[in-house]
Image (spheres, coloured by chain):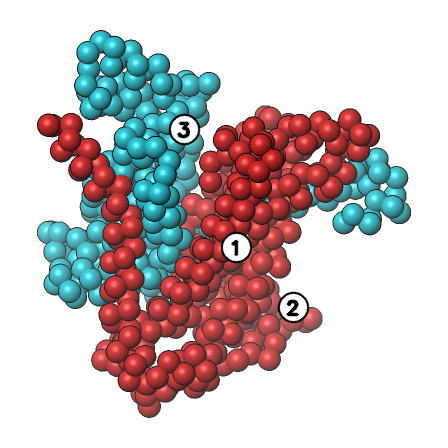
Chain colours: A cyan, B red
Amino acid sequence: MISLPRILHPRHAQVVAKAVLWAMTLATVGVLFYIIYFVLRRGLGHVGWDFLTEMPRRSGSVGGIFSTIVGTLYVTGVGVIVATPIGLGAAIYLAEYTREGRLTRIVRFGAESLANVPSIIFGLFGFAFFVTYLRFGWSILSGGLTLAFMILPTIIRTSEEALRAVPASYREVALSLGASKWQAIVRVVMPAAAPGILTGIILGVGRSVSETAAVIFTSGVSLKMPHSLFDSTRTMSVHFYTLTMESISEPKAYATAAVLVITILLINVAAYALMNRFTRKFR
Amino acid sequence: MKDRIIEKALLLAALSAVGILALITIFIFREGLPVVFSKGPGEFLTGTVWQPSHGHYGLVPMIVGSAIVTFGALIIGVPLGLACAVVLAEMAPPRARKILKPTIELLAGIPSVVYGFIGMMILVPWIRNNPALGGTGSSALAASIILGIMILPTIIGISIDAIEAVPRSYREGSRALGATEWQTITGVILPAARSGIVAGVILGMGRAVGETMAVIMVAGNSVQIPDSILKPVRTLTANIALEMSYASGQHEQALFATAIVLFIIIMILNSLAGLARRKKKRKRKLKGDPASGVEVA
């Protein structure tokens, strides 16, 4: 790369290099748009109100995906409800209660390592721990708790960033008015950081909805309507995987993919819009 | 008093991540180690035959499979990812950047099953029908390409942070000496950001090694050491996911043993990435660089 400019005048080399790099960037964006376009064009035609509200029949080759939507909501719900208080608590401790030192290094090491653990390992762990050891069986609870562990690092990181973005003056004013440290955090800092914290939660929802490997071995593959936390359920992603791999129905697979992709798009747009508003506020 | 209790509770929450990591380690090892001890670690790490029904648990084909697709993913993902990072951090006007960055981040949000599906529907037939390539299509090549795209957000995100952490004065100094923008990028900025970029590439590697569903859907999954990238391969992750649904007894333990190997690889990559990042910070601090305080890993 360094020797290349010797052939060309540096200014010309720059033009060529810029063109190549821009082309590569646009190609990357192009791949993304093509994936979305491909899935929606083939899938949307098969998605109607009945597809969303009917139960899947005959392994999903007939009917809709209603029970998998409900299953996804339950599993994701458990994950977020469990991970949010823990993650937020960890973030508050890191941002408000401690200085950088050995403890924060350990906490950050744990969170970063956890974030990089592959989802299949979460799946195996969830199977060994929740399903077998704690005897929760293949259930919404097992899957939800596994997802909670998986999205915890995301929630810790985004919440900590959000709390740190709140100017110190907010805390100082609250404390000078006689509030205790905890009151200042709960009444002043957290509300100000709320959009940022919410972004982390939404990103966690996105990860949960798209996850397959970690839930297939913990929540199972039942297509029945779940009635309790201890019922097995099949999430949309798992259902889509099964439809595809067992060649059950190509139109239904495309339709499920379209629903998944639209859900993920909405989640990401919401997260981005929130984050945008939040960062603008404190700039 | 109340504040004391709250602080203790928050500390507990903060330690949860480490606790969970420990719990995962304990349970994966607890389930996997018995078979490793009864068969001997050598069987797993040097055996080339995987036949659970006959008690053969050689992981070499899967280790080779994971290595090939990961390496392939890097060949595709690193140049593309670096190009995107340089464009986003150094070249794109703010408005273009505001659109491009979230768009590329969206790549990370697409479910891996959808990547696998796209691979099955577009890439695999394309490889099969291409006269220069051929084979069944489900191959190390297909897995490498899909993984190469999937690791882009990791590489791009961390590389952008690394490039942006390079102090302004470096750029200004270089430009003041008469270097063009491009000479500044290749001669000054990228070298200064190198350890951060390396960390991004290592974490991208980790993502490629750990990806499961997308790989299963395009890699063909036969247990063999392939003699060409057009041949099917089975990765460590695929080995676990494919057989977990029906395995029991020693076979199930062997899948946990596969997970131990995977887990160790991931933790090594994590540590390497952490080292690369710390090296960067230390270097900055030694030079008394004002940017060292701003940069958050």
The residue identified by callout 1 is B202
Amino acid type shown at disc 3 = Met
Residue A60 is at least partly visible in this image: no
| SS at circle 1 | helix
Q: For the residue carrying disc 3, how many other residues have a C-alpha within 10 Å: few (<14), some (14-19), or many (20+)? A: many
Q: Are marks 1 and 2 on the same chain?
A: yes
Residue A106 is at least partly visible in this image: yes
Q: Position of residue B189 (x, y in %)?
A: 67, 38
Answer above or below: position of A227 versus A175.
below
Does the residue at mark 2 contact the one at mark 3 (Cβ under 8 Å)?
no
The residue identified by callout 2 is B130
| Distance from Cα at disc 1 to Cα at disc 3 | 28 Å
Label of residue A150 in the image: none
- Residue at 17 percent across and 53 percent down: it is A141
The N terminus of chain B, quarter of image: top left
The residue identified by callout 3 is A275
